[in-house]
Image (cartoon, coloured by chain):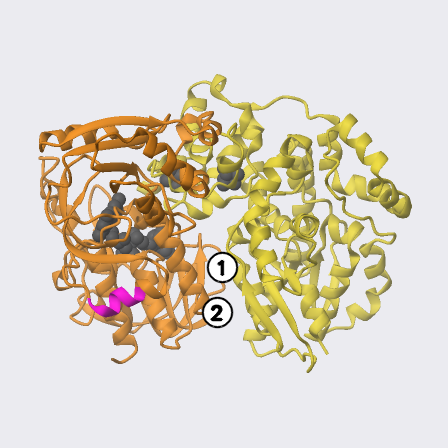
Chain colours: A yellow, B orange
Amino acid sequence: MKLQEFTSSKHNFEECMKCTVCTAYCPVLQANPLYPGPKQAGPDGERLRLKDPYFFNKALKYCLNCKRCEVACPSGVAVADLIQAARIRYDHTPPKLRDRMLASTDFMGSLARPFAPLVNFGTGLGISKTLLDATLKIDHRRSFPKYSGRSFEGWLKRHRKEQAAFPEQVAYYHGCYVNYNYPQLGKDLVKVLNALGIGVQLLEKEKCCGIALITNGMSATAKKHADHNVAQLRQAVMDKGLKVVTTSSTCTLTLRDEYPNLLGVDNADVRESILMATRLICEKLEQGAQLKFKADYHKKIAYHVPCHLERLGWGVFSERLLRGIPGVEFYLLDSACCGISGTYGFKKENYETSQAIGEALFSQIRALSPDVVACDCETCKWQIEMSTGFQVMNPISILAEALE
Amino acid sequence: MKYDVVIIGGGLSGLVAGITLQKAGKRTAIISTGQNALHFFSGTFESLQEPSQRIKDLFLEAGVRVHYNPGVRLTPMGTFKEAALSLEDIDLFPSEKIGKRVLIVNFQGYHDFFSSFLAEGLEKQGMQCRVRFLNLPELERLQQSPSEMRSVQIARTVDPLWEKVVQEVRLLLKDEDTVILPQVFGLADTSVPGRIRQGIPARVVFAGTLPPSVPGVRTQILLRKRYQLLGGTYLMGDEVVRAHVHEGVVHSVATKNLDSHYVEASEAFILSTGSYFSKGLVANPFRVYEPVFGLDVEYKEDRNAWYNPSFAGDQPYMHFGVKASADLLALKDGEPLQNLYVAGSVLGDTHPEFGSAAGQAIQSALFVADKILGL
Ligand SMILES: Cc1cc2nc3c(=O)[nH]c(=O)nc-3n(C[C@H](O)[C@H](O)[C@H](O)COP(=O)(O)OP(=O)(O)OC[C@H]3O[C@@H](n4cnc5c(N)ncnc54)[C@H](O)[C@@H]3O)c2cc1C
Ligand code: SF4
Ligand code: SF4
């Protein structure tokens, strides 16, 4: 029916029936009374903003961009996209130094890495935290991600030859976290994929996906990253015929959906080839591939589906893989936001909200007392480890650990 | 991905079918675009005049507290409606005389509970009403964003404060024999409505608010939890966009989130996509259709015959629905598809033997699950 083409609106906002369902699932609405909520900030506000930008409300910055409103909406309204798009369009306040610093994850990472021991020492130390808090309003109660001394890219380059020997190949978009903070996750992925007969290669030169730039008011820079990355993805997908795998749910959502929906960067030709590694592994297992696991592996695992994986609808793949490991006692945690949402929870003004939002999840974890919490998101990992003391592992790392 | 049974639509009917099949040992998945009609639920399962023990057990096992007491319930407008099987926090009365003097208590700043309508309605029936507002400091935070001071937000705040609510209501209570409170209790802790009843020395009645319905959201959460505990896979926020049908058999469905990764079912598919609200049925200026499979839909050709100009009258479009065989197999071009069953409100009124509304959702879902199990 052609009619639909002419009646659909940007981010589907005219489909809103005012049913209020989204308001029941917004984690911020409950914790921060200054936030107008998804319906008001999204489709209701959009109607006013289209009349006059005067109606743009700065409180939209409190949105976590967790997309839970979109998952709940029965009418397919892209509520969170509407909110982020409005911030991009109407909020012209120059971002603060702090926000620029928090947002530049690859810049920060490449600067910090050679000095990792120093940086880790510094950010762990009370004095410098107090300083960060006072000067930059980065909350002193946060623990910071550690920087690794050696980058993942360097490691994989050293293993390029053996990886190229595998009959099947994929490209890996590792993201800043794996490169600078936690190369072990990348190594774990290589181990699992190798066990399936798949070799791993890098993109020629990837850049930070840019999600933190988008949410911190630097969408012009984010668009440059997007243009660069989509060109890189094209090279892998179109020229080399590779699938591109990822281990971070937020990078994946950004590459696949935020690029076209928020930044207007067309990725239609590569979008379907960008996959969470868990999904690719599930597909391989379904096609008959097999993984050999340790006979004596035992672990009680509580799995938290991160918000952006929930939006992608792919939590089911991690769940399947974890349930499939012999000796795993599996628990699915109730769908809830941990409260950190990337750089959001690092900001002093959001700390209380952030912890209040996460509390339901934290108390469920404490009550279950698992050996490990599984989660496909690095910022959830920081938040949950800091707030509960329980160790958090990416499902890929758990698979790697359980492999023979 | 391959399951024994794939259920399209995760509302009441999809969940009831899913729970029943999982319990019988089937591997199932529910795929649902978004949330569902339970978010507008009054708390009364309509058209279940004589619910089977099986239905009551299904709810009990999920922790959904229901009671069965044919009579009437209070509507948010201060009128009464016939009701039988209901959630426990919905009071059922033998007659419309629920008390002589009624104290209606609302929270300060909460606009989704119509205390004055309630009072007006009840006074017409000879009851004396007094409306009072509670000012809980804990709720003042929410008032900063008055447009979004909604039932669920209030519920999350007041559940842990139920003792305080009891104290405050006791202070307001004079010689009234009945107290009416908004239905915003027991979202996380289902025992709260009962405790409030015990704490107040009068009959306590909970009356509906504007959506989201707290008893409905709670029912959705509990049923989903039960389904997942039984091992079911609940894919929320994904939409079935296409189906592969070959010679009268559905082979797989494609969804928005899973792109080319088709979801297969080795035994059956169930279509429980709801009515217009949930887009299980779609109406455009020319026709009413079922968007996933293009199934046969019973509706009137003449568009003028779709609606009744009297707003409150019976609306013909509400009776339109997907056509199905006596076994509830979906019809396409007049022929049944061999492994696609239909359940819930997407059926419209095409199979009145299953009742209507929630009664239809539950009874058709159980029937379909039994068919799949060969019972
Ligand atoms: C506003 C309202 C209030 C009601 N109140 C009551 C009441 O108080 N008491 C009562 O007895 N009955 C009530 N009803 C009747 C109600 O229809 C039934 O009670 C019952 O909840 C319907 O359940 P269902 O599972 O058939 O459909 P729904 O609850 O509508 O669920 C259908 C689900 O399917 C999903 N879906 C649709 N298309 C797709 C697709 N292509 N792919 C994947 N998923 C899809 C939708 O997102 C939705 O979640 C009410 C109905 C409405 C609309
Ligand atoms: S859930 Fe969707 S349709 Fe309902 S109010 Fe929110 S945006 Fe509108
Ligand atoms: S994206 Fe998350 S925080 Fe933002 S409005 Fe939606 S539910 Fe609320």
Q: Position of residue A124 (x, y in %)?
A: 83, 43
Bin the neighbour count of mark 1 within 10 Å (Cα to Cα): few under 14, some 14-19, many 20 and up: some
| Residue B294 falls left or right of residue B236 | left
| Residue B53 colored in magenta in the image | yes
Q: Which residues are magenta?
A: B52-58
Bin the neighbour count of mark 2 within 10 Å (Cα to Cα): few under 14, some 14-19, many 20 and up: some
Residue at image point 57% right, 52% down: A363
Residue A280, can we see it? yes
Q: Image quadrant for the C terminus of chain A?
A: bottom right
- What is the secondary structure assignment of the residue under circle 2? loop
Whether labels 2 and 1 belong to a single chain: the reply is: yes
Q: Is mark 2 within 8 Å of ligand 1?
A: no
| Residue A122 colored in magenta in the image | no
| Residue B158 falls left or right of residue A242 | left
Q: Is mark 1 within 8 Å of ligand 1?
A: no
Name the kind of residue labelled 1 in the image: Leu
| Residue A294 falls left or right of residue B128 | right
Looking at the picture, tell me which residue is in the foreground, B183 or A63.
B183
Query: B12 above or below A91?
Result: below
Q: Earlier in the sequence, mark 2 or mark 1?
A: 2
Name the kind of residue labelled 2 in the image: Met
Query: B116 above or below B335?
Result: above
Q: Position of residue A202 (x, y in %)?
A: 75, 57
Cβ atoms under marks 2 and 1 closer than 8 Å: yes
Residue bearing the label numbered 2: B1
Residue at image point 58% right, 64% down: A318
Residue bearing the label numbered 1: B258
Q: Main secondary structure of the magenta part?
A: helix
Looking at the picture, tell me which residue is in the foreground, B344 or A50.
B344
Q: CA distance from mark 2 to mark 1?
A: 10 Å
